[in-house]
Image: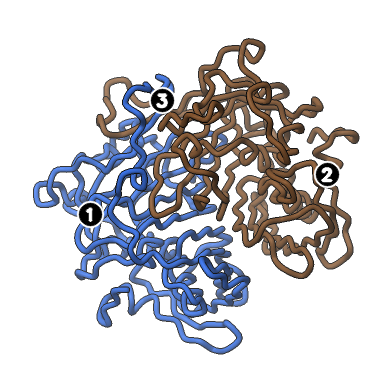
Chain colours: A blue, B brown
């Protein structure tokens, strides 16, 4: 896996083993979504780093996390447990705590994704049989976002200040079509497609994908909600990403009862789907 | 919640507290997907029943599970831990083991979904603003399946014997359009919409939804795969279901590297989305 000693992500997700599967770490203030509140994906990446240290497999294949309370900059402890080390997969769990209280519960299954990459016939994105028309009411999109080049897209940080959201300085976003909420006029259409990469030039690896799926503003803002808090986040990592910009698609289909889901897809520079996630969030 | 003493589901998901958050139970042979292998959703429902017994909240709002090894008919132990009992939500984890080995790791956040039901303006399925056309490449379907009445649909058990799949006798399925794999000719189009309910007349509740999302044959069979095994399953429960038939939609968008996801939606007889799930599975 690509790790660059000087990268912000690697520096800020470093964990120190203290024995018996326990790790100490520091929640950095560089990944905050607002003053004093760390990004959930960043907290999850801390758990993935710690659990990955215990696993005989290199890649987090699927990670699911329940967020119990907000994480804040400062010291944290991560307790990991390896439940099974199998031939093809390894499964375990991790709990991140601060001041003795659980912040995040995570479960993860690891695998080796070496060689899993370009789609091939019968083994890539699903191509529905040409002669069978999907029922009209069924959505069926399995292609990468069709985006203009990043150099012609909009940097949202030129549109709006994000005071306290230090995570916005860690990641570069390039919007092909700017969602209405950036202008204060929610469109009612909670879909966004855009480019993303680390601002310091670090290429994404499978650990970083577990964070990046949660690193953009919620598209539910385009429904006029004031904000949302993640209750649960599950990330499927489908392949190791190639270097370069990542093409992303985020969408929400259902807002009801004060909850909404958000789906997030990340496609790499080869056009390969590398991560697919869904979260359930509480509307604030 | 509706529980009918004589229902197969309630009988077969009964758990007995043995102190300290531990429960004993018996994995029934009535929910097998093949000889000697219990349905994953059924195993998850056992954990939801045990954890629900510990929670101050009635409904599993979101449940995520990693499947470590197959569950088999016979005795099982479930260890639960309540991590947080909050004012709006409660979070905990459960582990189902057989003969000392972990079968299933689950995490769940509970809530009270009383009164969450019919969609209302701004609070139901998302209605994209009429004047904004979604980008062509983006799927955006948030409506209930449009199905012919169950009485005019096909019962798949009249098409094919399912030896060893005892779960098929617990649940009634009615297919509006029969997927090709039922005839041995996969269509290449892994989407299915159909009706489902318990065969014994028990109405679904929020605990049953956590099982039902995993109770149909994988639609990836229509891609010609021989079968698939669930690695991880996450279920969002969006509302308590009304009595009656449940309208379901299952689809797979991405098969790559020997893995596929399956999305599953369940809509109740009022047309309300009551559950939305996704699993990552390994192709066999």
Residue B71 higher or lower than B31, as above or below: below
Q: Earlier in the sequence, mark 2 or mark 3?
A: 2
Q: Is residue B139 left or right of residue B144?
A: left
Q: Which residue is mark 1?
A: A173
Query: Residue A247: where, in percent of width, then height?
Result: 25, 50
Element under disc 1: strand
**Do the residues at discs 2 and 1 belong to one chain?**
no
The subunit letter for the residue under badge 3 reads B
Q: Chain of mark 2?
A: B
Q: Are marks 2 and 3 on the same chain?
A: yes
Up-down relation of residue B53 to residue B94 (above or below): above
- Chain letter of mark 1 equals A
Residue furthest to the bottom in view is A18
User: Relative to A72, does residue A25 appear above or below in the rendering?
Assistant: below
- Badge 2: residue crowd in 10 Å (few <14, some 14–19, many ≥20): some
Q: Residues within 10 Å of mark 1 (few under 14, many from 20)?
A: many
Residue density around tag 3, few if under 14, some if 14–19, many if 20 or more, within 10 Å: some
Say yes or no: labels 3 and 1 on the same chain: no
Q: Nearer the viewer, residue A201 or A267?
A: A267
Residue holding disc 3:
B127
């Amino acid at each position: 896996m690509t790790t660059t000693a000087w990268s912000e992500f690697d520096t800020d997700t470093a964990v120190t083993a203290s024995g018996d599967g326990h790790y100490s770490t520091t929640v950095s203030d560089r990944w905050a979504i607002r003053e004093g509140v760390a990004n959930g994906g960043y907290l999850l990446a801390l758990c993935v780093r710690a659990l990955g240290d215990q696993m005989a497999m290199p890649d987090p294949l699927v990670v699911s996390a329940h967020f119990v309370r907000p994480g804040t900059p400062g010291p944290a402890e991560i307790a990991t447990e390896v439940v099974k080390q199998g031939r093809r997969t390894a499964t375990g769990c991790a709990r991140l705590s601060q001041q003795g209280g659980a912040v995040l519960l995570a479960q993860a299954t690891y695998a080796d994704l070496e060689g899993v990459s370009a789609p091939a016939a019968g083994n890539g994105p699903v191509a529905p049989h040409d002669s069978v028309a999907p029922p009209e009411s069924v959505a069926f999109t399995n292609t990468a976002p069709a985006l203009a080049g990043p150099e012609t897209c909009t940097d949202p940080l030129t549109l709006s200040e994000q005071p306290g959201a230090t995570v916005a300085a860690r990641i570069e976003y390039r919007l092909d079509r700017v969602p209405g909420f950036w202008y204060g006029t929610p469109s009612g259409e909670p879909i966004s497609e855009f480019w993303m990469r680390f601002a310091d030039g670090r290429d994404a690896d499978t650990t970083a994908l577990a964070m990046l799926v949660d690193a953009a503003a919620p598209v539910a803002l385009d429904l006029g909600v004031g904000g949302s808090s993640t209750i649960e986040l599950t990330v499927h990592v489908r392949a190791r990403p190639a270097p370069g910009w990542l093409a992303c698609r985020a969408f929400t289909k259902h807002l009801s009862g004060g909850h909404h889901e958000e789906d997030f897809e990340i496609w790499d520079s080869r056009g390969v789907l590398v991560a697919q996630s869904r979260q359930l969030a509480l509307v604030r």
